[in-house]
Each structure stands twice: as C-alpha cells, then as structure tokens.
Image: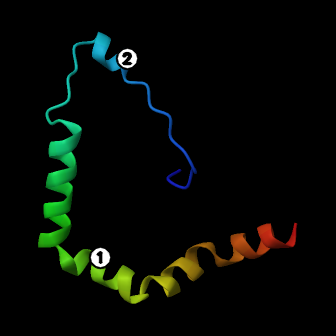
C-alpha cells in the first residue's frame, strides 16, 4: 500500500451517501503548501538525503530481489 504508481479514484459512491468535500482542490493545495512551509522540520531530512538509510533498511532487500529477476 502506498507504493502504487497510479490511483484512479471514483467518489461517486460516497457522494451518493451525501458526502461533499470541505475544500475545493485549489484550497486544499494552498493549505498543503502552507503546511509544508510551516513544517520544514518534516521535509528537511528528505531533501538532505537522510531518508536514504531508512529507505535502504525498509526496502533494500526487496529491491535487490526484484532487480535480480
């Protein structure tokens, strides 16, 4: 989960139950950008490359096995 290359969403069923989004796509993107701006601590390690050790520990073996096939 979370590693799929594409998500094709269909919200028609949940809308049929009466759900409506709280924010427009534009507003949600604006709020997301503001969050990243206010939370540099969260993404700074990713940009600096510190995440690579974690990624290698979590996925290294699986990636190596996939590459061998």
Q: Left of 49 or right of it: where is 17?
A: left
Crowdedness near tag 2: few (<14), some (14–19) or many (≥20) residues, C-alpha within 10 Å: few
* The C terminus, quarter of image: bottom right
Crowdedness near tag 1: few (<14), some (14–19) or many (≥20) residues, C-alpha within 10 Å: few
Front one among 25 and 41: 25
Residue at the (14%, 44%) spot, across then down? 27
Residue 51 circle label: none
**In the rendered image, the vertical position of residue 56 relative to residue 16, given as above or below:** below
**In the rendered image, the vertical position of residue 46 relative to residue 32, given as above or below:** below
Q: Mark 2 points at which residue?
A: 12
Residue sitting at the far top: 16
Residue at the (37%, 17%) spot, across then down? 12
Image spot of residue 13 (x, y percent) = 38, 15
Image spot of residue 33 (x, y percent) = 19, 61
Q: Left of 53 or right of it: where is 13?
A: left
Q: What element carries label 1?
A: helix
Residue sitting at the far right: 69
Say whether disc 1 or disc 2 marks the residue closer to the N-terminus: 2
What is the quadrant of residue 63 in the picture?
A: bottom right
Spatial CA distance of label 1 from label 2 is 34 Å
**In the rendered image, the vertical position of residue 10 relative to residue 42, given as above or below:** above
Q: Name the residue under label 1.
A: 43
Front one among 60 and 22: 22
């Amino acid at each position: 989960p979370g590693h799929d290359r594409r998500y094709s969403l269909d919200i028609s069923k949940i809308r049929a139950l009466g759900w409506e989004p709280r924010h427009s796509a534009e507003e949600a993107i604006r709020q997301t950008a503001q969050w990243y701006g206010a939370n540099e601590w969260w993404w700074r390690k990713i940009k600096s490359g510190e995440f690579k050790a974690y990624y290698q520990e979590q996925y290294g073996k699986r990636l190596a096995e996939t590459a061998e096939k």
